[in-house]
Image (cartoon, rainbow, N blue to C red):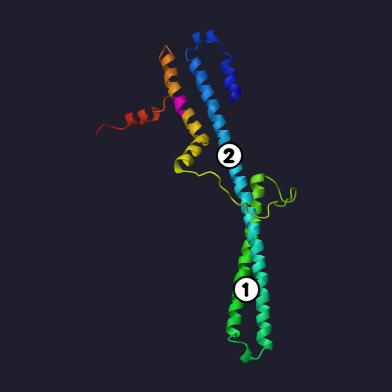
Amino acid sequence: TEIGYKALTNFGTASTLISPDLEIRKQQAKRGLMATSAEYQKLHNEVVHDATRLYYTAVYAKQQAQLADRVVARLGLLVEIGRETLRSTPAKELEGFNLLKLQMMENGLFEARKLQLSARVGRQKALSGLREVMAVDDRTFPFQIKDKELPVMSQKAALAKERVAELALERRPELVLAAAGVDAFRLEVYAQGKIPFRRVAPTLAQGADIHAKEIPAT
């Protein structure tokens, strides 16, 4: 797009005698350059967003897996203590602890192990997603997540709804893309008016015009 824009700017004023719409075409090319830059910025923002989100997803998944490991270890220890207590302690000294309560503890341990497995699978998925967005392979680019836990989010300035909307509008390249498209359309109207001889050229409404002619009047 930039090469095309520079090529148009190389034409001097004399070229407008042959193509009266040349100056407007230069303006259109500039709008096209703006639109392409906006598309690039939009893609750049999406990549940064995806990489950041997946990175902290991997950090969070690691925290979940570590928490699940600690819970399973503690519950496993409590179950072993319960089994030993039930086996070696006289019934009158158990103070209400019985086989049913032990089975409830074992069921809780079973559920915790299921969550532990889910956390480990989730961490592997998060790491796979992070490798995908980085475009690396786990065999050729092994890595470890540096952060051990999610950062504590602190906010020093109050944000009102109006300020949030303002910041969003300032940082949306789609707005630049849309504005460039509208302006290019406006310039096309002016360019057509610069042409001294009427030429047959397709318009945005050409398809609708042809279709309307084919429909019989009722």
Q: Position of residue 207 (x, y in %)?
A: 39, 30
Residue at 66% x, 76% y: name it.
78
Q: Examine the structure image and report whether residue 13 is included in the region drawn in magenta.
A: no
- Secondary structure predominantly adopted by residues drawn in magenta: helix
Q: Quadrant of the N terminus?
A: top right
User: Looking at the image, which is closer to me, 96 or 63?
Assistant: 96
Mark 1 or mark 2, earlier in chain: 2
Q: Amino acid at mark 1?
A: Leu
Could you tell me residue 41's position as x and y percent?
57, 35
Q: Is residue 166 above or below residue 12?
A: below
Q: Secondary structure at mark 1?
A: helix
Mark carried by residue 109: 1
Q: Amino acid at mark 2?
A: Asn
| Residue at 64% across, 46% down | 133
In terms of image quadrants, where is residue 197?
top left
**Residues packed near mark 1 inside 10 Å, few (<14), some (14 to 19) or many (20 plus):** many
Of 123 and 6, nearer the camera is 123
Q: Residue at x 69, y 83 (%)?
A: 84
**Left or right, 200 with reference to 214:** right
The quadrant where residue 95 appears: bottom right
Q: Circle 2: is it few (<14), some (14-19), or many (20+) Cα within 10 Å?
A: some
Which residues, given as a range, are shown in magenta? 181-185
